[in-house]
Amino acid sequence: MTKLKVTIAGIEFDARFEEAAAPKTVAAFRAQMPYKSQVVHVRWSGEGVWIPLGETDFGVDYENHTSYPAPGQFILYPGGISETEILLAYGGVHFASKMGQLAGNHFMTLTSNLDKLAEIGPKVLWEGAQEILFEEV
């Protein structure tokens, strides 16, 4: 069985795809793996980090979407009134942009080292962009 691993700022987390609730988003993201980028701290949404993706089109619409991801949940905003992005909540999040409230597809959830999650936000906020790597191992 394939294991999903997410490494953020050198901290490793196990994760699971939300395949039953967001099958199209999971398939679109899985096709990009391994996926390496950087996270920066959110501007309007609260305690989260995000990967700004500009005009990237994952070819998905809304499924399993929320404006309030729980800590450890990844959401993918497929674009529209704001740019495409992936957001990880490390604390309280009300997903928004300068255009107002948004909703993203909850497609992945961290399942280990959740006690380390709270370290990510302050590190990104005070030290700047941090590397993130999604991989199936």
Image (tube, rainbow, N blue to C red):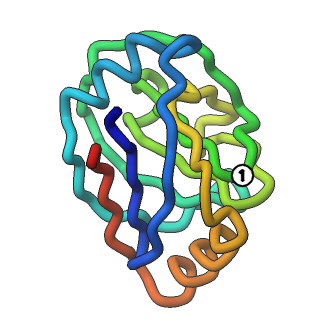
Q: Nearer the viewer, residue 88 or 82?
A: 88
| Percent position of residue 81, x then y | 48, 25
Q: Nearer the viewer, residue 98 or 13?
A: 13
| Percent position of residue 3, x then y | 37, 43
- Up-down: is 56 above or below 44? above
Q: What residue did someone put label 1 on?
A: 71
* Residue at left offset 38%, top offset 35%: 84
| Percent position of residue 115, x then y | 72, 70
For badge 1, the amino acid type reads Pro
- Up-down: is 72 above or below 2? below
Q: Nearer the viewer, residue 82 or 75?
A: 75
* Residue at left offset 38%, top offset 75%: 130
Q: Secondary structure at mark 1?
A: loop
In the displayed structure image, the side of residue 95 where residue 3 appears, left or right? left
Quarter of the image for the N terminus: give it: top left
Disc 1 packing (10 Å; few <14; some 14–19; many ≥20): some
What is the residue that sits farthest to the front in this orientation? 1
